[in-house]
């Protein structure tokens, strides 16, 4: 199934501007429901700027309204994403985004150390000297560099980043774990933890009720009996 060009930013926009369920948004954007939940709760690592799928031609208002009426309905992409064809030569980055390159480089170094400087250079469009300076923390602006997802910053696409990560992991002999499996395990662990907490609360409530009943019964049993009537005229 086709996915929007910027799935996380699109999910952020749909959370803020529609009444679609998290399941519908996750299915349309190709994300896990926990990722959509994190975006809705503002607990994502990076604050996302919403991307309007209506203006991008990926959705129509009629399609969104159809999904809002039926929670089981799955939104359909209105057009295929144009394949980006790279030409030979250095990657061009708009001037407005060039200041974000160090943040994107730092994010890749922190989260994917198996990626080589050459691969980062081609992916982000920077020099190996800059990458080495950030890796060694000798960059002139290192104090202000904050690791941020280069896809969110618009420096690359998720497809290109995934391809580089897979290639680097294969070359390094690293066994990649599927993200969906990891998230599924996290969800099952969370459900188990919540179920255990609920059962513990139920046991505590039952114990408290039993204690109250036992205390009430004890008060009835220990209550003093009234003295027998004594006839003052009887000897």
Image (tube, rainbow, N blue to C red):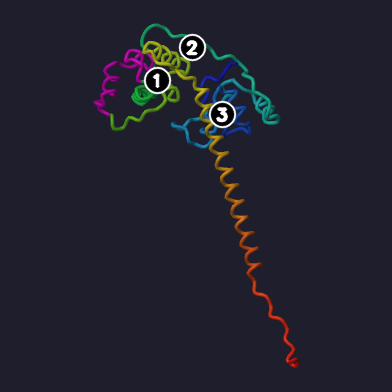
Q: Which of the two residues, 9 or 223, is positioned nearer the viewer here?
A: 223
Picture coordinates of residue 153 (x, y %)? 42, 25
The residue lying toward the viewer, choosing from 218 and 15, is 218
Of badges 1 and 2, nearer the viewer stands: 2
Question: Which residues make up the magenta segment?
Answer: 113-141
Instruction: Indicate yes or no whether the magenta region holds residue 134.
Output: yes
Q: Quadrant of the C terminus?
A: bottom right
**Looking at the figure, which quarter contains the N terminus?**
top right
Residue hosting label 2: 84
Residue named by callout 1: 94
Residue 99 visible in the current orientation: no
What is the x, y in percent for residue 5?
52, 19
Residue 94 versus residue 219 in the image, above or below:
above
The residue pinned by badge 3 equals: 33
- Residue at (43, 14) in percent of width and height: 166
Spatial distance from mark 1 to mark 2, Cα to Cα?
Answer: 16 Å
* Residue closest to the eye, 71 or 154: 71
């Amino acid at each position: 199934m086709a996915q929007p060009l910027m799935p996380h930013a699109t999910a952020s926009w749909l959370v803020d501007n529609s009444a679609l369920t998290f399941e519908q948004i996750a299915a349309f954007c190709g994300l896990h429901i926990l990722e959509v939940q994190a975006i809705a709760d503002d607990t994502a690592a990076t604050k996302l700027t919403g991307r309007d799928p209506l203006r991008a031609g990926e959705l129509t208002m009629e399609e969104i309204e159809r999904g809002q009426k039926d929670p089981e309905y799955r939104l359909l992409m209105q057009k295929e994403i144009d394949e980006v064809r790279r030409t030979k030569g250095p990657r061009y980055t708009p001037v407005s985004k060039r200041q974000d390159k160090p943040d994107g480089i730092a994010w890749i170094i922190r989260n994917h150390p198996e990626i080589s400087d050459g691969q980062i250079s081609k992916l982000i469009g920077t020099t190996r000297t800059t990458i080495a300076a950030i890796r060694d923390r000798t960059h002139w602006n290192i104090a202000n560099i904050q690791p941020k997802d280069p896809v969110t910053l618009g420096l690359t696409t998720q497809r290109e980043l995934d391809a580089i990560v897979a290639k680097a992991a294969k070359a390094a002999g690293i066994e990649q774990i599927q993200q969906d499996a990891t998230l599924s395990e996290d969800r099952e662990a969370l459900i188990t933890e919540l179920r255990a907490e609920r059962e513990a609360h139920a046991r505590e409530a039952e114990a408290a009720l039993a204690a109250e009943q036992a205390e009430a019964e004890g008060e009835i049993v220990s209550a003093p009996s009234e003295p027998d009537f004594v006839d003052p005229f009887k000897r």
